[in-house]
Image (cartoon, grey):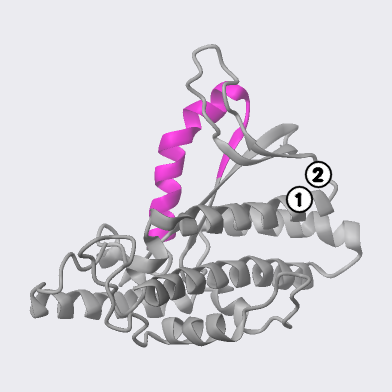
Amino acid sequence: MFLQSPVDEPALVFRWRQGADRARLLSISSPHASSWLSVVPSEGLGLHLNPDQFQVAIKWWLGLDTSGGSLCSLCPDTVLDPLGHHASTCKRGGDAVFRHNRLRDVVAESCRLAHLSVKVEAGYNLTPDHSHTRPADVLVQNWSRGRPAAFDICVTSPLNTLTLSEAGVCAGAAAQAGEVRKHSANDDKCGDLGWFCVPLVTETYGAWGAEAKACFSQLASRLSIRLQKPKSVILYELYGRLNTCLVRCVATAILSRIQSS
């Protein structure tokens, strides 16, 4: 969360904005982050934004004010910050869950296209103590060395105050921190079940973590053989679908809070 009330100290806001702009620029300049801008629009393939979504997405991408001077309609006394950080991370209203599920579905569909056996939301109550609750957003059988992989999808913001200082210096720092958190939470669970834990973490601007990029590279190799297409083309299409979905969801979250306030 950024601003707690309309009377936050201007100096604090200015310092946050300086660091946030640096983090934003590093994130949007990361490999594949801008892939959503170069896809051929297609509603049938999920590669589309409507005019309102595209307008607010461009403003958000360029660091222009997306807040309209509004309060968040779902969080009392919380000001919508100009960079859209609160709107893109707000847990209320279902936008974050919808975004997560849409990214999960794109990954699952891509795995199925590669003829991989896939189960969505796997791991619930698979052990006697019922402690292993859904460590896999997408469970892929025979991923590596005959063992399944538990893909755990997460979206994190480089503008979060916990990682802002690192994200303003090193591109992908927020995604890397997210990978560490996911391993800490799920390695033991996945190990007991005989699975690999594979965090698929992206920043809100589409900068994917190192483990996600390695996973997508391996998936693209399989798809390249299956579809008889160059791996580079497969990766271009995969990142295009993922990041178009991501940006569309962020734009929707921003618009819903502006229009409802």
Q: Position of residue 157 (x, y in %)?
A: 39, 63
The C terminus lies in quadrant:
bottom left
Say which residue label 2 marks: 116
Kind of residue indicated by mark 1: Cys
Q: State the extent of the magenta-drawn residues as a range.
A: 174-198
For the point 62% across and 79% down, the residue is 49
For the point 41% across and 46% down, the residue is 180
The N terminus lies in quadrant:
bottom left
Q: Position of residue 159 (x, y in %)?
A: 32, 68
Prevailing SS of the magenta stretch = helix
In screen coordinates, is 62 left or right of 23?
right
Say which residue label 1 marks: 111
Secondary structure at numbered mark 1: helix
Kind of residue indicated by mark 2: Leu
Q: Are marks 2 and 1 in contact (CB under 8 Å)?
A: yes
Residues packed near mark 2 inside 10 Å, few (<14), some (14 to 19) or many (20 plus): some
